Amino acid sequence: MKRAGRLLFVAVPLVAVAAYFAVPGQSGDDSRSDARTASPARSADGRGGLDSPDKKELAQRIVSSAENSSLDWRGQYDYVEDIGDGRGYTAGIIGFTTGTHDLLDLVERYTKSHPDNALARYLPALREVDGSESHEGLGSGFVAAWKAESRTAVFRRAQDSERDRVYFDPAVRLARRDGLGALGQFIYYDAMVMHGPGTDPGFYGIRERAMEQADTPAEGGEEEAYLDIFLDARKKTMKEEKRDTSRVDTAQRQFLYDGNLDLDTPLKWKVYGQPYEVR
């Protein structure tokens, strides 16, 4: 028997945010101006989806607040370091890692279309360290090459494309199939980014555990209750991995308890105790 969930719609006070975090280079005349005029993607019931231009931009900013402690996700293309999580180097706009195959896949795909790139020489080493935390054959040379290549528009576009192919598009498609609106689509996307598109402890394992306990809206369940249970399942995985859970506790769960199923702005949230706001 699937449980109905424990979601209680009570007033949850928002902590006042002391500062508004402006994002460099996000002025009204930037490269997103054309995208803003495009017709947003909508589900069969007329609700806007996460892949509408404004919602997708918002999603990247919220993820970046957790992944990079910044709303400026476009400032993360050249980011690369070992954060000590056992996944080797973490790099780029979505935290591709040398230990979990997605960074290798990105560089292999990029090299097929741009064989003379600065990262191509590190492909043998990337294949060797895939699945481990090793830096063997990488080191400062690889870090410098990543930063240099990230200054090129073509590699930035390659990162965008790989993010969408591996994480964003599959998460949004599956969330729509489960009958979820923009918030549910974001909750799936963020889980896909952090845990990867695998079974336990990956995204698909988390979803499977949630579906054992609650019906999705597509199955006739209540959207709020299903998402609450999904977040419970995800938080359990995060605790098992000894990860900070604030991106669930004081961000996604807050949006859910506020009843903001369409992920509408203005939004206020906290990650790692740091306040953020998007108006």
Image (cartoon, rainbow, N blue to C red):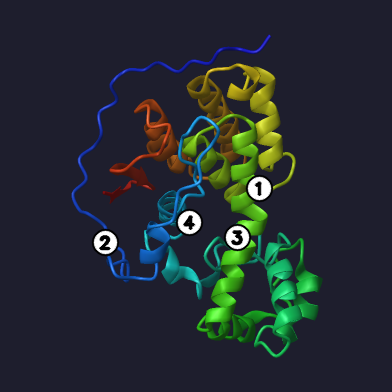
Looking at the image, which residue is at 46% across and 40% down? 48
Secondary structure type for disc 4 = helix
In this rendering, does residue 50 appear at all?
yes
Q: Earlier in the sequence, mark 2 or mark 1?
A: 2
Q: Earlier in the sequence, mark 1 or mark 4?
A: 4
Q: Amino acid at mark 2?
A: Ala
Q: Which residue is mark 4?
A: 67
Question: Callout 2: 10 Å neighbours few (<14), some, many (20+)?
Answer: some
Secondary structure type for disc 1 = helix
- In which image quadrant can residue 163 be found? bottom right
Q: Which residue is mark 1?
A: 170
**Front residue (pair 72, 222):** 222
Question: Callout 4: 10 Å neighbours few (<14), some, many (20+)?
Answer: many
Q: Amino acid at mark 1?
A: Pro
Q: Amino acid at mark 4?
A: Glu
In the image, taking residue 148 as reference, residue 257 lies left or right, namely left
Image location (x, y in percent) of residue 274: 32, 50
Secondary structure type for disc 2 = loop
Image depth: mark 1 or mark 4 in front: 1
Q: Earlier in the sequence, mark 3 or mark 2?
A: 2
Q: Earlier in the sequence, mark 3 or mark 1?
A: 3
Q: Which residue is mark 3?
A: 163
Above or below, 94 relative to 232: below
Q: CA distance from mark 3 to mark 1?
A: 10 Å
Q: Which residue is mark 2?
A: 22
Looking at the image, which residue is at 70% across and 38% down? 204
- In which image quadrant can residue 241 be found? top right
